[in-house]
Amino acid sequence: MPELPEVEVVRRGIEKWVRTRTVESVQVLDPRSVRRHVDGVLDFEESLTGCTISSVGRRGKFLWLGLAGLESETVLMAHLGMSGQLLVEGAEAPDEKHLKVRLSLSQAKDYPDELRFIDQRIFGGMFLSSLVPTKDGLPGGVGVQEPLIPQAAAHIARDVLDPYRSAEDLYVALRKRSTELKRAILDQAVISGVGNIYADEALWQSKLSGLRKTATIRRPEVQRLNEALIDVMTRALAAGGTSFDSLYVNVNGASGYFARSLNAYGREGKFCLRCVENGVASVIRRDAFMGRSSYTCPVCQPRPRVR
């Protein structure tokens, strides 16, 4: 599933290629991909037609396109789900096998004519959402300046790369929970945008066990974890995200290559790179976790004695 760096790569691509352009027509090829638009397919198509894309915002894994031309303060939400893709394509390009929604855009020199939503597994979708004031009076997310956020994303916390979030915010949110550390940082109400891959990477980098109880976490440890989260996400973003298959690509169809830089996730049975540098032959282990897997080093991420 795309995580924060992958969605931010897509956001930047849409901002570059689509912002300031007008939606000239909309075609929904599969109604299931706009099922969250309660007023139906026809209203979705008619509402978007004639609107200009004014901004491209993101909080966590939620992505939205600001719309100029609608009477109400409404944005176009684009949720990628597990396999959703947003591609900018020329109108002459053949339709993708799992093409669900097509937005034809006003012409711009050397720019593709269409924004396409492709979704193989149909867990994602597009829909219109009204804007509501942010609880803290600050900008709603990355890429926007107004203190507004889509109603559909108002329930989640600020994300790892949000400039208006701090390590102290994370510490306070963690201490309010009574759970294990990894479960907490995967909770989008604590900090948004962190998925399983980057949670393992940040916990490894900060030398913390995901089994630690949040009630025992100390400020210096949270500072270390916060710095690791930002560093991991920033490096992943620079690499275009993490692609393990063809389902995640950027708006131009290219895969990310951060998978080559993973230090913990997916390295079961391989030596811990940090321990090897310190002359210790420790091997990364894999444990079942919430129907998925956790990858940790038993030496530099010691488990708590009491759980």
Image (cartoon, rainbow, N blue to C red):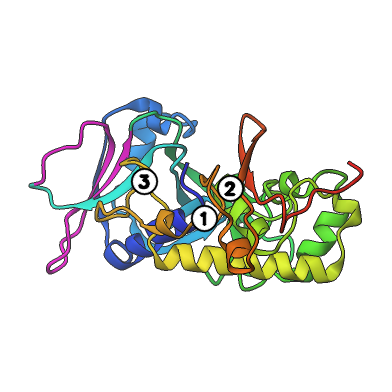
Q: What residue type is labelled 1?
A: Leu
Which label sits on residue 248?
Answer: 3
Q: Going by the image, does 123 lie left or right of 115?
A: right
**Camera-side residue of 24 and 259:** 259
Q: Give the range drawn in magenta.
A: 93-119
CB within 8 Å, label 3 to label 1: no
How crowded pointer 2 is (Cα within 10 Å; few <14, some 14-19, many 20+) is rated as some
Residue at 26% of width from left, 31% of height from top? Answer: 98
In three-dimensional space, the C-alpha distance between marks 3 and 1, rounded to whole angstroms, equals 12 Å
In three-dimensional space, the C-alpha distance between marks 1 and 2, rounded to whole angstroms, equals 8 Å
Compare marks 3 and 1 and give the one earlier in the sequence: 1
CB within 8 Å, label 1 to label 2: yes
Q: Does the magenta stretch include residue 180?
A: no
In three-dimensional space, the C-alpha distance between marks 3 and 2, rounded to whole angstroms, equals 15 Å
Q: Can residue 67 be seen in this view?
A: no
Q: What residue type is labelled 2?
A: Gly
Compare marks 3 and 2 and give the one earlier in the sequence: 2
